[in-house]
């Protein structure tokens, strides 16, 4: 009887261990019921997609970079006069030289539109760590109002690779994982070329982007598959060559500062 009882206990323990492992596997962030991305073998937000290698950035890169003489200052730490929401003026908090997302106040967008450009901005995810995966320090930078470069607290925070910090959201993970600790300022330098269509509304040039985070190149002239979406295939829909820069309200008090932009010119133009 004792031997049988011991065997039963061992069996129950083994089954419990399998159950725990299975539960952990099921909790891995991501989706397997989403479409396969064009030209890839991965689902949109695939949890099994390889995680980019971890790179520890230098202490600073372009942090505090002053705007060049031809730059347009979008945020100088004082007010949100260059930003708006669909229903009027932007209502994010401004203090101590930064702006901060106010939950449920809405994403904000620039009053002006931009096409091919160089964008600099700095951000910090909340010092107080709350939530996990996509629920932690989430925001985003939408180029032309459609193409998202992800902002997320990815410091010891597993999520699906095409949704981590620096991802072209829902399309491509970054080439490296380069997060700083929660609350630390990080710098983005983004070089974007807008898509183009011909007179018949046929796409002749996809949107492309080069992204540098904290001094590390995450994407180099990478082409977007289409506009950014959640759990769906990205597609292109014709739009003007210029659009707003949008900063996302995802319910987390992410901070931004020192935002400026330069229009990219043409060679051999006076």
Image (cartoon, grey):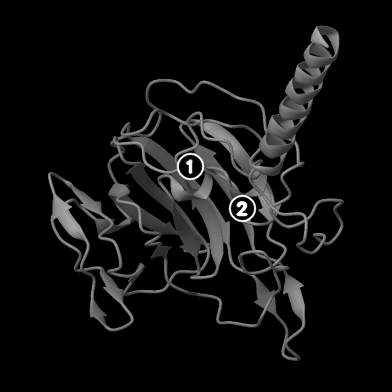
Closer to the camera in the image, 266 or 221: 221
Q: How many marks?
A: 2
Closer to the camera in the image, 11 or 201: 11
Q: Return the mark for residue 251.
A: none
Residue at the image position 69 percent from the left and 55 percent from the top: 171
The quadrant of the picture occupied by the N terminus is: top right
Judged from the image, the secondary structure of the residue bearing numbered disc 1 is loop
Q: Which residue is mark 2?
A: 168
- On the question of residue 268 being in view, the answer is no
Left/right placement of residue 236 relative to residue 74 reads right
Task: Where is residue 37? Give x, y as percent.
Answer: 80, 59
In the rendered image of this protein, does residue 11 appear above or below residue 147? above
Circles 2 and 1 in contact, beta carbons < 8 Å: no
Identity of the residue furthest to the front in this view: 1
In the rendered image of this protein, does residue 36 appear above or below residue 6? below
Q: Which residue is mark 1?
A: 132
Closer to the camera in the image, 161 or 201: 161
Task: Where is residue 131? Give x, y as percent.
Answer: 42, 44
Judged from the image, the secondary structure of the residue bearing numbered disc 2 is loop
Identity of the residue furthest to the top in this view: 3
Left/right placement of residue 254 relative to residue 226 reads left
Task: Where is residue 174? Give x, y as percent.
Answer: 63, 41
Task: Where is residue 241? Give x, y as percent.
Answer: 56, 76
Quarter assignment of residue 170: bottom right
- On the question of residue 20 being in view, the answer is yes
Quarter assignment of residue 227: bottom right
Closer to the camera in the image, 107 or 203: 107
CA–CA distance in space, label 2 to label 1 = 20 Å
Residue at the image position 18 percent from the left and 58 percent from the top: 93
Q: Nearer the viewer, mark 2 or mark 1?
A: 1
Earlier-in-chain disc, 2 versus 1: 1
């Amino acid at each position: 009887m004792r031997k049988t009882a011991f065997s039963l206990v061992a069996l129950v323990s083994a089954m419990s261990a399998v159950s725990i492992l299975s539960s952990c596997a099921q909790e891995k962030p991501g989706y397997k019921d989403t479409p396969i991305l064009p030209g890839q073998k991965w689902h949109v937000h695939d949890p099994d997609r390889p995680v980019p290698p971890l790179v520890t950035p230098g202490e600073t890169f372009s942090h505090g970079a002053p705007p060049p003489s031809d730059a347009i200052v979008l945020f100088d730490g004082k007010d949100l006069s260059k930003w708006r929401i669909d229903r009027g003026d932007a209502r994010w908090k401004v203090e101590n030289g930064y702006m901060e997302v106010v939950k449920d106040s809405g994403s904000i967008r620039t009053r002006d539109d931009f096409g091919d450009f160089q964008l600099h901005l700095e951000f910090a995810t909340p010092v107080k760590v709350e939530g996990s995966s996509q629920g932690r320090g989430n925001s985003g930078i939408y180029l032309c109002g459609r193409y998202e470069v992800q902002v997320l607290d990815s410091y010891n925070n597993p999520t699906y690779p095409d949704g981590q910090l620096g991802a072209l959201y829902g399309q491509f993970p970054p080439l490296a994982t380069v997060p700083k600790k929660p609350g630390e300022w990080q710098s983005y330098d983004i070089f974007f070329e807008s898509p183009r269509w011909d007179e018949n509304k046929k796409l002749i040039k996809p949107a492309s982007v080069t992204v540098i985070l904290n001094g590390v190149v995450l994407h180099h002239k990478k082409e977007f598959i289409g506009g950014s979406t959640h759990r769906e295939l990205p597609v292109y829909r014709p739009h003007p060559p210029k659009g707003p820069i949008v900063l996302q309200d995802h319910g987390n008090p992410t901070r931004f500062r020192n935002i400026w932009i330069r229009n990219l010119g043409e060679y051999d133009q006076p």
